[in-house]
Image: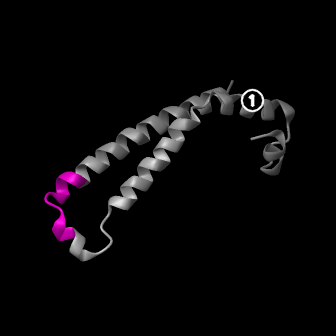
Amino acid sequence: MEKDDLEKIGISDPEHQQKVLSAVKEMHLDRCCYLIETVQDVISRFPQRASELVLSLNPKKEAQAICNELVAQTGDLQKEVTCLRNLLHK
């Protein structure tokens, strides 16, 4: 992300641009990527055909495990969003 990108989305004040760029540098973008991978993994686990539902030994337990994993990843993302918001308010 550069100043040109910020201007395209309407952030033209140099002071605001610097705040956003500084905040982006402090974010842990690798965690965001990890969350994307987790969501894609969860989506790939959903049955595509009715016959796949029968093959699961304990679909309720598997679904609960997936939901627990999503909750944990969402918590990590929430921490990053809070950090970004705090940095932008500085």
Could you say where residue 39 lies in the image, as x and y percent from the top left?
Answer: 43, 52
Is residue 71 rendered to the left or right of residue 11? Answer: left
Q: Residue furthest left?
A: 57
Q: Check disc 1 and report the residue beneath it.
A: 19
Vertical placement of residue 32 versus 82, above or below: below
| Three-letter amino acid code of the residue under disc 1 | Lys
Could you say where residue 36 lies in the image, as x and y percent from the top left?
Answer: 49, 49
Query: Over which residues does the magenta segment extend?
Result: 53-62
The type of colouring in the image is: one colour
In the image, 15 versus 51, the foreground residue is: 51
Residue 72, quarter of the rendered image: top left
Tell me the residue at 69%/23% (across/down): 90
In the image, 66 versus 84, the foreground residue is: 66
Vertical placement of residue 14 versus 68, above or below: above
Tell me the residue at 33%/43% (across/down): 69
The reply to whether the magenta stretch includes residue 54 is yes
Tell me the residue at 13%/59% (across/down): 57
Q: Residue furthest bottom?
A: 50
Q: Of helix, strand and loop, which one carries label 1? A: helix
The reply to whether the magenta stretch includes residue 36 is no
Is residue 21 rendered to the left or right of residue 44? Answer: right
Tell me the residue at 80%/48% (across/down): 10
Residue 84, quarter of the rendered image: top right
Residue 15 appearing in the image = yes
User: What secondary structure do most residues of the magenta stretch adopt?
Assistant: helix
Vertical placement of residue 51 versus 32, above or below: below
**Quadrant including the N terminus:** top right
